[in-house]
Image: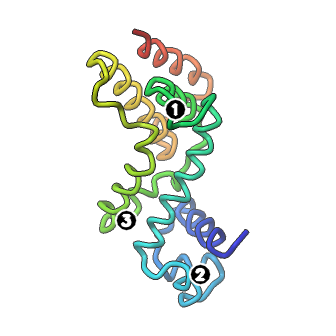
Amino acid sequence: MNSREHILDSALALLRSGGSVSLESAAREAGLSKPGLMHHFRTKEALMLALVDHVVDGWERALAERLTGEVARASAGDRIRAYLAWSTSGGFDEADLVVVADPRLRPAMTARWEERLGPWLALPDDLDPDARARLTAVRLLCDGAWLADAAHLFPIPPDERDRVRAVAERLLEP
């Protein structure tokens, strides 16, 4: 693992333990000096944006495993189905909430989040309004599923995940 990856993994571990991320805390968690960390991330914003990318990289790998082809060639329905399968699989934690980890940086982090997840979640402008409504409803269910899991706030019990997924799949039917 390279130093940059080690720093990001350490910062995520800090978030998972309930800590807040600063250049100092991230350096300490990674076993580096602050100047050593700043060699890789000049500012806290750079570190936090890299954390968003680090989290989304993992998400994209998991989403891609649920598609038969490339995301760029997948239909909106196939992309949302992959998101449904992934978001109801469980196993999320506080580090997945990195987008809301720093209120001062939230606009920049939200913009990065939207940029990275747009290829998966954006819907074509010319989509039939009923299809758009169904896909949006399922996406919002997915957002809620991973958020509940990551925040440990009424997550879907493991024995109900398949049934919840089946209900959402029915919403995707024309």
Instruction: State the separation of the CA atoms marked 2 and 1.
Output: 43 Å
Q: Amino acid at mark 2?
A: Arg
- Which secondary structure lies at badge 3? loop
> In the rendering, at what x and y percent does residue 151 appear?
47, 46
- Which secondary structure lies at badge 1? helix
The residue positioned 54% from the left and 30% from the top of the image is: 82
Q: Nearer the viewer, residue 161 or 137?
A: 137
Dot placed on the residue nearer the N-terminal end, 1 or 3: 1
Dot placed on the residue nearer the N-terminal end, 2 or 3: 2
Q: Amino acid at mark 1?
A: Arg
Could you say which disc has been placed on residue 102 in the image? 3
**Pointer 2 and pointer 3: residues touching (CB < 8 Å)?**
no
Residue extending farthest to the front is 73
- Which secondary structure lies at badge 2? helix
Q: Amino acid at mark 3?
A: Asp
Instruction: State the separation of the CA atoms marked 1 and 3.
Output: 35 Å
The residue positioned 51% from the left and 25% from the top of the image is: 78
Dot placed on the residue nearer the N-terminal end, 2 or 1: 2
Instruction: State the separation of the CA atoms marked 2 and 3.
Output: 19 Å
Could you say which disc has been placed on residue 73 in the image? 1
The residue positioned 51% from the left and 20% from the top of the image is: 164
Q: In terms of image quadrants, where is residue 86? A: top right
Q: Nearer the viewer, mark 2 or mark 1?
A: 1
* Quadrant the C terminus occupies: top left
Q: Residues within 10 Å of mark 2 (few under 14, many from 20)?
A: some
The residue where tag 2 is placed is 28
Residue extending farthest to the right is 1
Q: Indicate the colouring scheme.
A: rainbow
